[in-house]
């Protein structure tokens, strides 16, 4: 695999960690909070995004409009069972989800959770770096080209870890802002 292949793996890690962090609620209603919630509908497990539209009507309320209104109850149950601490009200054609404000203690718990998720991303980055370095050593490049490739891999690794750190600090700032 070439350097571009490893860089695409690094980008994928950043995307995955970003999506993972989006599921941590900040006390502010955002559709990303529920988009990937798994709902049992039509005899299979589906993401909420595939079953309904999700919109934030104000900073504390999400409105979910199911494509098929017969799924409203299973969607509401999935949200209630999700342990996100959200209040759910099924209305005629939509579902209203209230996002309560977070206590300071809960905010600090979520900061720790966010840091754990980012640390998991860093572990994935180190694994990809390790693979890349092994491939560089096994390659049939001359010594100078190999050293140059290793340096490029390290630069890409450092850049990716920096992006993860930035993402973590943004999420932390978002969580601690009332």
Image: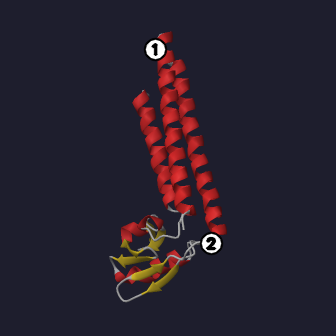
Seen from the viewer's position, the closer of residues 53 and 50 is: 53
Q: Is residue 72 above or below residue 139?
A: below
Residue 3: quadrant of the picture: top left
Q: Residues within 10 Å of mark 2 (few under 14, many from 20)?
A: few
Earlier in the chain: of badge 1 and badge 2, it is 2
Q: Quadrant of the C terminus?
A: bottom right
For the residues carrying marks 1 and 2, which lies nearer the camera in this image? Answer: 2
Q: Quadrant of the N terminus?
A: top left
Is residue 165 visible in the rendered structure shown here?
Answer: yes
Residue positioned 48% across, 50% down in the render: 16
Mark 1 highlights which residue? 145
Tell me the distance, in whole angstroms, between the alpha carbons under discs 1 and 2: 54 Å
Measured as percent of width and height from the top left, residue 145 is found at 46, 14
In the picture, measured across the screen, residue 30 lies left or right of residue 112, that is: left
Q: Is residue 78 above or below residue 144?
A: below
Q: Residues within 10 Å of mark 1 (few under 14, many from 20)?
A: few
Seen from the viewer's position, the closer of residues 15 and 41 is: 15
In the picture, measured across the screen, residue 124 lies left or right of residue 30, that is: right
View extreme (left): residue: 67
* The disc label shown at residue 103, or none: 2
Residue positioned 48% across, 60% down in the render: 22
View extreme (bottom): residue: 92
**Is disc 1 placed on a helix, strand or loop?**
helix
Residue positioned 45% across, 49% down in the render: 15
Measured as percent of width and height from the top left, residue 176 is found at 57, 62
Measured as percent of width and height from the top left, residue 170 is found at 51, 53
Seen from the viewer's position, the closer of residues 77 and 150 is: 150
Measured as percent of width and height from the top left, residue 61 is found at 44, 77
């Amino acid at each position: 695999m070439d350097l571009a292949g490893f860089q695409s793996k690094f980008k994928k890690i950043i995307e995955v960690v970003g999506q993972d962090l989006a599921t941590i609620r900040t006390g502010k209603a955002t559709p990303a909070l529920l988009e990937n919630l798994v709902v049992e509908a039509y005899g299979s497990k589906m993401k909420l995004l595939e079953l309904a539209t999700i919109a934030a009507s104000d900073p504390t309320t999400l409105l979910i409009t199911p494509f098929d209104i017969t799924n409203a109850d299973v969607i509401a149950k999935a949200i209630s069972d999700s342990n996100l601490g959200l209040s759910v009200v099924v209305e005629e054609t939509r579902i209203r989800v209230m996002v309560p404000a977070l206590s300071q203690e809960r905010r600090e718990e979520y900061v720790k959770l966010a840091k754990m998720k980012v640390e998991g991303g860093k572990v994935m980055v180190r694994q990809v770096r390790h693979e890349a370095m092994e491939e560089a050593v096994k390659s049939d490049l001359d010594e100078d080209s190999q050293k140059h490739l290793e340096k490029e891999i390290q630069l890409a690794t450092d850049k990716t870890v920096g992006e993860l750190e930035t993402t973590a600090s943004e999420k932390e700032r978002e969580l601690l802002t009332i």
